Image (cartoon, rainbow, N blue to C red):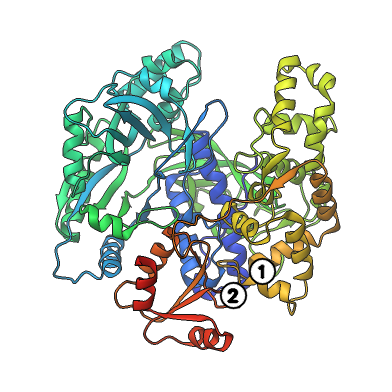
Amino acid sequence: MSQPALPDLSRDVATLTPIEAADLLGQCAEAIAHHNRLYYGEDSPEITDAAYDALMQYNMALEAAFPSLKRVDSPSERVGTEVQSGFGKIKHIVPMLSLANAFEDEDVFDFITRVRKFLSLPAEAPLSLTAEPKIDGLSLSLRYEAGALVSAATRGDGSEGEDVTANIKALASIPKTLTGTPPDVIEVRGEIYMDKSDFLSLNQAQEEAGQKQFANPRNAAAGSLRQKDPAVTGRRPLRFFAYAAGEVIGKAWETHSAFLADLTSYGFVVNPQTSLCEDASALLSAYHAIGEARADLPYDIDGVVYKVDDHRYQARLGQVSRAPRWAIAHKFPAEKAMTFVEDIDIQVGRTGALTPVARLTPVNVGGVIVSNATLHNEDEIQRKDIRIGDKVILQRAGDVIPQIVEVVTSARNEDSPAFTFPTSCPICHSPAVRPEGEAVRRCTGGFACDAQIVEQLKHFVSRNAFDIEGLGAKQIEQFFQLGWLRSPADIFALTTRFDEMAALDRMGEKSAQNLINAINDRREIDLDRVIFGLGIRQIGQATAKLLAQHYESLPSLMQAAQEAADETSQAYQELVTIDQIGASVVADIVQFFTDARNQKAVTDLLSDITPLSLEAPSQDSVISGKTIVFTGTLVRQSRAEAKAQAERLGAKVAGSVSGKTDYVVVGADAGSKAKKAADLGLTILSEDDWLTLITG
């Protein structure tokens, strides 16, 4: 699959227009989702940790500068990737979250400041935190009931992971029965990893057996865990560090450090480098001490994780969609090496974006052999003046393919020509245009471009969309070449091609029938999956779910989008005021549903499927399903804590007041939102009224 376009991270956020920022946010979202899938789901990353972190940082900087443009499917609020094929699925009762990152000492001080502000904690009040090495492995959740191991799952997308129970039970390093006095139920979470020496020995054995070697210890650990035969996993030297809990029944701990102490009594290994710190200076001392010992440690680490020790504070701080507010990962600097650019290829993504990729002379960077690097876009090539034949400096922080940091111009041949970015699509030869103010050049071929059609169909059947087992990227490409697939509806027409599919090489009758059954199983599917599967720009899973909840059917959404082409219409106002959906997202929705080809594709699809409306919100609280707007300064809670609490109780928190707002909670110095609420005759609550309402 081709890489999506990456933004030019050198562009100064402060100088961007809203249109430019919206486009860059779209590029970030698409690229980060792509690389999450490769890293977490396929163990085959295309970019370095440093390049990924820089991309995520830039996305967050854009969101901070343009908060109204923040996407509902923002990468800053997503975890991992969807569960891959080949394993069953286990739903995490308590989500497995990711972590926010810190890169500079200042980021650590900012983190502690944010924690204190959220908790309304005075500067003199004690705030203990733990510092734990961040293991470069594969996240795992182990569930024990009555002290016995009953299931094991990878993180997956944070909500649902791969069922690897049989493989984990084959490992001697994982306790099958807990010692001491464990709770009735406990999910122990941690990291599966492989020691450096064991990794080298495994690769040597793989080479002698004529089998594929692993790129680094993390990939070796992930590949070993995901073996089809548990016996193979059992023979691999996998180890486990425990550091967190999921669901726990029958016990509670006051602090994280007390929890870690009990883990050791249950038979788990907790990282001995973990320490308890009383302030930011102590955290940084621990960070630098661990960093200095990094090369001598028997396992790979890529940073240090800081966690608020007090569990009561952790509960109050809660989480954003992607990460807890009470923890952060302080990453180590990247590693570097030199090599040559042998060629520059242009790849075409699902949205038509043209992405340049450098083909490199293979080089060892921090123990990993790399041969490719994304060049992001044509501005990146021009800014760094990267040319074929150049000697370049690469940067890596634990992954396979690094980022080009700079060109060694002193080593360049005098007659070396500058790289000319194509103005036509290398696949369909349609014009490739770059709209004013945007960094990405896109093919205009649309459905006439084979690359775009194939990538759109791959997205349609992906795990977070239709999730059709047995219909992966290779099958999509094969069926497309055979002329069987051009639109999503054609996928359901495959059920009439049993004989043709069964006759294909490596297919057979059983596989053909299994695929037909899998396709038929998706004729009834949740509406939000359908909307996400359509591949509308800027519409990720979270945005799709919001649209599904709001419009309840695909025809209703399509009609509303068509009416919203008139920005003065009520349909436009209704669409743009949905929480976290701004003008940029609305423009992409309107553009998609007003295109005649897309309308036909949706209509044809609806003749084959029945989208299911999402379940109504829980009625467990008085504000379930209600729309709440907070305005002004709150005293008894911070705005962030109040919003998080409302969402936990099943409410929708909106950013603007409309006729559909149920409650407007007004703090001190409330401005135009309070006035508009009064003008509309909405229910206005003081902070005390609000707390009385939700606590009864």
Q: Mark 1 points at which residue?
A: 575
Which x, y percent locates residue 193? 34, 30
* Residue at image location 22% in from the left, 50% down from the top: 287
Alpha-carbon span between mark 1 and mark 2: 22 Å
- Viewed as shown, does residue 336 lie left or right of 509? left
Q: Toward the viewer: 512 or 217?
A: 512
Q: As rendered, which of 150 and 346 lies closer to the eye?
A: 150
Depth check: give the residue in front, 544 or 2.
544
Horizontal side of residue 179 vs 565, given as left or right: left
Side of 660 relative to 592 (left or right): left
Q: In this view, does 119 lie to the left or right of 581?
A: left
Question: In the rendered image, which residue does mark 2 sit on?
Answer: 17
> Height in image: 217 above or below 311?
above
Name the residue at the top extreme. 209
Task: Give whichever of discs 1 and 2 has the lower sequence position.
Answer: 2
Q: Find residue 536 and report its image quarter.
A: bottom right
What type is the residue that disc 2 sits on?
A: Thr
| Residue 231 place in picture, x, y as percent | 42, 13
Residue 71 at x, y percent in the picture = 56, 62
Q: What element carries label 1?
A: helix
Residue at the spot 32% in from the left edge and 51% down from the top edge: 329
Marks counted in the figure total: 2
Asked if the residue under mark 2 is in contact with the one under mark 1, i.e. CB atoms within 8 Å, the reply is no
Callout 1 amino acid: Leu
Q: Quadrant of residue 336?
A: top left
Examine the rendered structure and indicate whether residue 66 appears above or below residue 151: below
